[in-house]
Amino acid sequence: MATIQISVDDKMKVAADSLFSSLGLDTATAVKMFIVAALDYDGLPFSVRHCTPKSDMLEAIEDTRLRRNLVGPFTTAEEAVQSMLED
């Protein structure tokens, strides 16, 4: 049996552990599942590509970072959805 060691950022490790735990897995099992899927797929089991957000998404991201054009807060999800539908 072989051992694979990787280094990841501490926050990434905690987030991954939490995610996989919520799925009933530990991180080592999730990594093993990835390797099995890659071997079955004969490549990465997901597409690898550049993801460039559209200009309106980039504008929305910038608005959020600068805290401009924000609406709310809302007390319910229904209020938030209604606000989005009004635009």
Image (cartoon, rainbow, N blue to C red):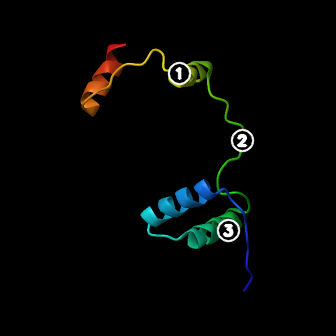
Alpha-carbon neighbours of circle 3 within 10 Å: few (<14), some, or many (≥20)? Answer: some
Which residue does the numbered mark 2 point to in the structure image? 49
Residue positioned 68% across, 62% down in the render: 41
> Which of the two discs, 2 and 1, sits closer to the camera?
1
Q: Amino acid at mark 2?
A: Arg
User: Contact (CB < 8 A) between labels 3 and 1?
Assistant: no
Alpha-carbon neighbours of circle 2 within 10 Å: few (<14), some, or many (≥20)? Answer: few
Q: Check the picture and name the quadrant holding the C terminus.
A: top left
Tag 2, which secondary structure?
loop
Say whether residue 34 is left or right of residue 77: right
Which residue does the numbered mark 1 point to in the structure image? 60
| Numbered mark located on residue 43 in the image | none
First in residue order: circle 3 vs circle 1: 3
The CA span between labels 3 and 1 is: 36 Å
**Could you say where residue 81 lies in the image, as x and y percent from the top left?**
31, 26
Alpha-carbon neighbours of circle 1 within 10 Å: few (<14), some, or many (≥20)? Answer: some
Residue positioned 49% across, 70% down in the render: 25
Tag 3, which secondary structure?
helix
Q: Amino acid at mark 1?
A: Ala
Vertical placement of residue 37 versus 80, above or below: below
Which residue does the numbered mark 3 point to in the structure image? 35
Q: Amino acid at mark 3?
A: Ile
